């Protein structure tokens, strides 16, 4: 079991009520239901159509806005493909679970493995681009280099899939943004995708359980929603994905498909504030002052003296009994305060 999976009765009741609502909502999407042959699939609950010119940058990892998701909604994004090691397996897993994702394709991979890219398109996923060569220095690159990488990446995808096949969605390799990259993409009507959550699936030291745990923990930390960034080119991601999807389904998450607005595909009506990513409120622990600690220690010492049992459970009178003394503690505290004062007077 993953950390944090234990639920109280109230939590279970809330989840049951939530799932009932989710199922009722799913019943309203017969087109989506009809496309999915697997009755146990996690599925794609809805599609959001977005206008990149209105929202040029998304992903709370770096930006104020993100895709306007409700609680327990995820947008799955997959970077760096297509590659023989991984892309086909991930496509099979997503097909079995009826999930539509957004791919960020590397141009040179598209040219090298065109049939795999065609499979991504045929499965109905959104196809964004991730530059031509995946350079990890675009934050320091000249505008001309940024433009070439972006445009070559799009051209490579469209050389395989046809003109206009690439969505106007771009993710910069390594999320290494720059002012000039952002300005260029916005000037071309290209939506720059950062992310809300990463699961470190690119790290060699990580295993499947580590990927699943990071994805779940970080989605929860973001208020149980967000864009999730994974890579469909790593065997460890392929191994983690079924476990992750099972766990997400168990927790009541749903997947949302994002597509770009076109004249035939109008944007989903949203309010501007829905795009502003609000970090969930965290419980703030009260700040402890030195005087709080002194009071706490004094209280503990008084309790030991009164009870006749020390911190380790040794009884008064035994050889091991810790002789707590409020006088000794006070002397130590005075010495500590003198040391602090001396440091500050240097
Ligand atoms: Zn990448």
Image (cartoon, rainbow, N blue to C red):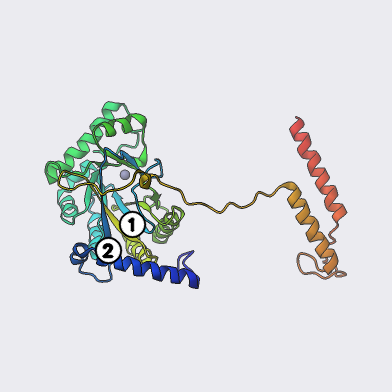
The x, y position of residue 25, in whole percent, is 29, 64
Is label 2 in contact with label 1 (beta carbons under 8 Å)? Answer: no
- The first of marks 2 and 1 along the sequence is 2
Left or right of 156 on screen, residue 313: right
Of residues 180 and 58, the one nearer the viewer is 58
Q: Residue at x 75, y 34 (%)?
A: 343
Q: Residue at x 18, y 66 (%)?
A: 34
Residue 43 — which label? 2
Q: Nearer the viewer, mark 2 or mark 1?
A: 2
Under circle 1, the secondary element is helix
The x, y position of residue 171, in whole percent, is 30, 42
Q: Quadrant of residue 344?
A: top right
Under circle 2, the secondary element is loop
Against 202, is 14 above or below? below
Left or right of 209 on screen, residue 327: right
Within 10 angstroms of label 2, few (less than 14), some, or many (20 or more) residues?
many
Of residues 295 and 176, the one nearer the viewer is 295
Of residues 19 and 79, the one nearer the viewer is 19
Left or right of 331 on screen, residue 158: left
Within 10 angstroms of label 1, few (less than 14), some, or many (20 or more) residues?
many
Residue 237 — which label? 1
Residue 275 — which label? none
The CB of the residue at mark 2 lies under 8 Å from ligand 1: no
The x, y position of residue 116, in whole percent, is 18, 52
| Quadrant that contains the N terminus | bottom left
Q: Is residue 330 visible?
A: yes
Against 261, is 307 above or below? below
Q: Is residue 140 visible?
A: no
| Quadrant that contains the C terminus | top right
Q: Quadrant of residue 45?
A: bottom left
Q: CA distance from mark 2 to mark 1?
A: 19 Å
């Amino acid at each position: 079991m993953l950390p944090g999976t234990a639920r109280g009765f109230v939590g279970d009741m809330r989840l049951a009520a939530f799932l009932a609502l989710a199922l009722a909502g799913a019943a309203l999407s017969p087109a989506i239901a009809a496309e999915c042959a697997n009755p146990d699939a996690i599925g794609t609950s809805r599609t959001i159509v977005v206008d990149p010119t209105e929202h040029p940058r998304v992903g709370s990892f770096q930006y104020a806005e993100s895709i306007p998701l409700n609680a327990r909604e995820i947008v799955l994004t997959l970077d760096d493909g297509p590659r023989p090691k991984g892309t086909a397996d991930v496509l099979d897993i997503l097909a079995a679970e009826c999930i539509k994702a957004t791919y960020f394709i590397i141009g040179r991979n598209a040219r090298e493995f065109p049939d795999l890219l065609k499979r991504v398109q045929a499965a109905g996923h959104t196809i964004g681009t991730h530059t031509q060569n995946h350079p990890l220095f675009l934050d320091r690159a000249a505008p001309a280099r940024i433009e070439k990488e972006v445009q070559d990446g799009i051209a490579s995808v469209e050389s395989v899939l046809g003109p206009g096949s690439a969505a106007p969605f771009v993710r910069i390799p390594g999320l290494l943004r720059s002012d000039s990259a952002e300005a260029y993409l916005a000037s071309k009507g290209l939506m720059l995708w950062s992310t809300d959550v990463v699961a470190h699936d690119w790290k060699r030291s990580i295993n499947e359980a580590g990927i699943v745990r990071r994805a779940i923990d970080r989605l929860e930390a973001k208020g149980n929603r967000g864009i999730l960034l994974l890579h469909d080119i790593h065997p460890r991601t392929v191994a983690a994905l079924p476990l992750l999807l099972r766990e997400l389904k168990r927790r009541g998450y749903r997947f949302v498909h994002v597509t770009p607005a076109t004249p035939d595909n109008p944007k989903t009506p949203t309010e501007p504030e829905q795009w502003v990513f609000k970090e969930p409120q965290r419980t703030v622990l009260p700040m402890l002052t030195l005087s709080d600690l002194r009071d706490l220690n004094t209280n503990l010492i008084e309790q030991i003296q009164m009870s006749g049992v020390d911190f380790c459970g040794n009884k008064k009178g035994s050889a091991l009994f810790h002789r707590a003394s409020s006088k000794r503690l006070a002397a130590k505290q005075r010495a500590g305060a003198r040391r602090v004062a001396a440091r500050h007077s240097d």
